[in-house]
């Protein structure tokens, strides 16, 4: 079993749709959690950190459930520019040793 | 700030050749890492460093060496290239003092093909 598992996707949605991505992690010692966005053939960039209290950034909402070892990302009112691969990332400590999920690809269509 | 820079952007090697992928960061980050990304997959950690003079293995270290003589530079050496090392290589840096709690900043990647 992979340490970080994501919905395999792909997700194809119309503009304006709400879409949710799920991620589970297996190591209960994990300490910090992130969603990164990766555009085709480019480097990943931080979308948002994920906290137990939940956090929101505009149309994006991230949730963490430590008991279930589950992370989610909700995108409301999808835009064409949201088309990308979304990577769930888990850190066990501060050493820059991140474990990445395989990513979920989102395509938003007009 | 240039952030994280990587050279070269593209490289083609023959099986058995060796080469060094360069990575530099100008953010004074203490942590640096090398990842590889194969098609349709996430990033896998090759080696990482928590500071100058200190390195350790990640998930897929075989066939690669690293060293960190300065805070800024973290080169990745392929000892004897194999077709299985065809991949996109990303270097990243991070700091425990960053506002987003260990957010990793990535370089643009090196696309390596081994024939």
Image: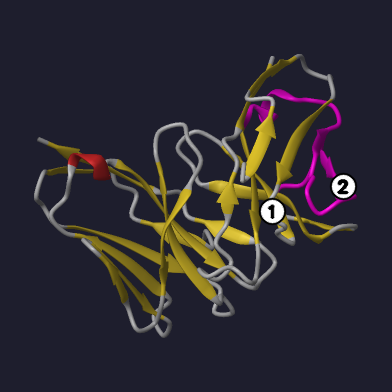
The answer for which chain carries disc 2 is B
Residue B55 against residue B101 in the figure, above or below = above
- Check if residue B78 falls in the magenta segment: yes
Residue at left offset 59%, top offset 60%: A98
Residue at left offset 81%, top offset 61%: B51
> Which numbered marker is on residue A66?
none
Q: Quadrant of residue B62?
A: top right
Total marks placed: 2
Q: Quadrant of residue A40?
A: top left
Q: Secondary structure at mark 1?
A: loop
Q: Position of residue A3 (x, y in %)?
A: 54, 63
**Disc nearest the viewer among 2 and 1:** 2
Residue at left offset 76%, top offset 14%: B14
Left or right of B5? Residue B100 is left
Task: Decide whether the magenta segment is chiefly helix, strand or loop.
Answer: loop
Q: Position of residue B8 (x, y in %)?
A: 69, 25
Counting residues from the N terminus, which is met first, the one under dot 2 or under dot 1? 1
Colouring method of the image: secondary structure
Residue A25 against residue B115 in the figure, above or below = below
> Which numbered marker is on residue B67?
2
Q: Which residue is mark 1?
A: B59
Q: Nearer the viewer, residue B90 or B43?
A: B90
Q: Position of residue B87 (x, y in %)?
A: 61, 31
Mark 2 neighbour density, 10 Å: few (under 14) some (14–19) many (20 or more): some
Q: Secondary structure at mark 2?
A: loop
The magenta segment is B60-87
Left or right of B112? Residue A46 is left
The answer for which chain carries disc 1 is B
Residue B68 against residue B23 in the figure, above or below = below
The Cα atoms of the two marked residues, 2 and 1, are separated by 17 Å
């Amino acid at each position: 079993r992979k340490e970080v598992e994501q919905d395999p996707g792909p997700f194809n949605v119309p503009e304006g749709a709400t879409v949710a991505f799920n991620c589970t992690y297996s190591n209960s010692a994990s300490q910090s959690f992130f969603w990164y966005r990766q555009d085709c053939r480019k480097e990943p960039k931080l979308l948002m950190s994920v906290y137990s209290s939940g956090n929101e950034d505009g149309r994006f909402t991230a949730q963490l459930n430590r008991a279930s070892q589950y992370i989610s990302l909700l995108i409301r009112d999808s835009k064409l520019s949201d088309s990308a691969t979304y990577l769930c990332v888990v850190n066990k400590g501060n050493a820059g040793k991140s474990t990445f999920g395989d990513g979920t690809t989102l395509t938003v269509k007009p | 700030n240039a952030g994280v820079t990587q050279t070269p952007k593209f490289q083609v090697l023959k099986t058995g050749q060796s080469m060094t992928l360069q990575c530099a960061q100008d953010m004074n980050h203490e942590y640096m890492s090398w990842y590889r990304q194969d098609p349709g997959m996430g990033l896998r950690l090759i080696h990482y460093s928590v500071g100058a003079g200190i390195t350790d293995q990640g998930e897929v270290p075989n066939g690669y060496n690293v060293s960190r003589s300065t805070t800024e530079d973290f080169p990745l050496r392929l000892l004897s290239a194999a077709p299985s090392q065809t991949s996109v290589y990303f270097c990243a840096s991070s700091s425990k003092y960053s506002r987003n709690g260990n957010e990793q900043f990535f370089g643009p990647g090196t696309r390596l093909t081994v024939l």
